[in-house]
Image (cartoon, rainbow, N blue to C red):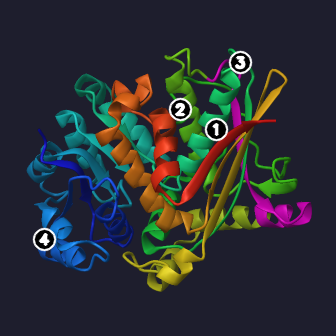
Amino acid sequence: MLKYDVALYGATGFTGQIVAQYLATHPQQPRIAFAGRNTAKIQSVIDNLVQVSAERVKSIGIIEASSDDYASLQRLAEAASVIINTVGPYSLLGGYDVVRAAAESGTGYVDLNGESTFFAQLAADHSAKAKETQAVIVPSCGFDALPFDLTTFLAVQLLKKEGSITNAAALCGYSYQGGVSGGTIASILLKRDHPEELALASPYMLSPVEGESTLTNAVMALPQFNEYGFPTILSPHNARVVYRTSGLLQSEPSLDYGAGFSYNEAHIAPSKIHARLALVVVYIISWLVIHVRLLGIVLTYLIPQGTGPSLETRLKGSLDVRTLVKADGKQAVATMRGNYDPGYHLTAQFISEAALAIALDRGSLSPVARSGGIVTPATLGHALADRLNKYADVEVTAHRL
């Protein structure tokens, strides 16, 4: 029997500390350990946990592990059922080797990466080993891209209850309020070295099957909000994860999205004119990220890595995701709503519940996830949605129109 259900790698970082608090106070009291290169800093994180009993604090393990010591990553992977990795940007800070260690050990793995190129590399290099060892490896379990991927899955599956579907068109509209951290800035700036990550023209970058591009870079009408919306910098990666889910589920007829599936998403705006103006801003920001390196220096100085929005800001945040799916004359909407910052407060809950679904509810995962591999948040299936409804500060629903 493994010593821990979940090992949190990166517990001393900004997001890692939020995850640590959530895991320590989780009602199921999973067996947890915090991991990183500096055990004294990890002990400080444990000492600063709030509303945690002395007995619970004493039960939290400490594992010394570093991305520049592969043997330590192997020991980390062998100690727990699942690794939560919050050390990003992942392509720069050893994420590849953490996944490698997990895949070789048959250990589950979840992270918060929004780096399409890194995700693609993981899928190319570690899928076979992860399937062989039945390691359930799930990148992008935070705001990138869990809410969009999971709500699409739930709306499609609701329509499939009445039989197979074809030409399903998913349109996700969303709004949110929240802050930004230095780690997020660092991940966005990485895209200047991979400008294809900002392009809407490559939605199948992560998918095991190819298809025609359906993504639009224009303003969209969002009937589920009765508003207009615009694609954002988040949209390309979210779409790639959704299309990977669609591709993976083709191997499971009961869950397959059907031939001709398409996906688009947009952040809502107060009016069509506002949406057009916002889209121009997105284009300008994308251009600046790629071409103006001084921007990175300034942003990194203003919001250094390891810092992020205050607790007050996080508690004032909100999330409203509504994914409308139309297929064969039928319609369904899946929603995810929460009252806190989705980038940090809710993200910590998303990644934790994904990890706990793998560690504690593996038998309830979809067959695609259960068999192991480099999968996606939505392939964890209804088990993940159920956990979010039961334990997290979000409400996830799906209904027919």
Q: Amino acid at mark 1?
A: Thr
- Graded by Cα atoms within 10 Å as few (under 14), some (14 to 19) or many (20 or more), the crowding at tag 3 reads few
Query: Percent x, y for residue 314?
Result: 53, 75
Q: Amino acid at mark 3?
A: Glu
Give the residue number, with chain letter if any, for mark 4. Answer: 39
Please report contact status of discs 1 and 2: CB closer than 8 Å, yes or no. Answer: yes
Give the residue number, with chain letter if any, for mark 2. Answer: 245
- As helix, strand or loop, the secondary structure at mark 1 comes to helix
In the rendered structure, does residue 67 fall within the stretch colored magenta? Answer: no
Query: Percent x, y for residue 310?
Result: 48, 82
Is residue 383 positioned above or below 53 on the image? above
Q: How many marks?
A: 4
Give the residue number, with chain letter if any, for mark 3. Answer: 162
Give the residue number, with chain letter if any, for mark 1. Answer: 152
Please report contact status of discs 2 and 4: CB closer than 8 Å, yes or no. Answer: no
The N terminus: image quadrant: top left
First reached walking from the N terminus: tag 3 or tag 2: 3
Q: Amino acid at mark 2?
A: Thr
Quadrant housing residue 228: bottom right
Which residues make up the magenta segment?
A: 257-279
First reached walking from the N terminus: tag 1 or tag 3: 1
Mark toward the viewer: 1 or 3 = 3
- As helix, strand or loop, the secondary structure at mark 2 comes to helix
Q: CA distance from mark 1 to mark 4?
A: 40 Å
Q: CA distance from mark 1 to mark 2?
A: 10 Å
- As helix, strand or loop, the secondary structure at mark 3 comes to loop
Q: Residue at x 20, y 78 (%)?
A: 47
Q: Residue at x 14, y 59 (%)?
A: 65
- As helix, strand or loop, the secondary structure at mark 4 comes to helix
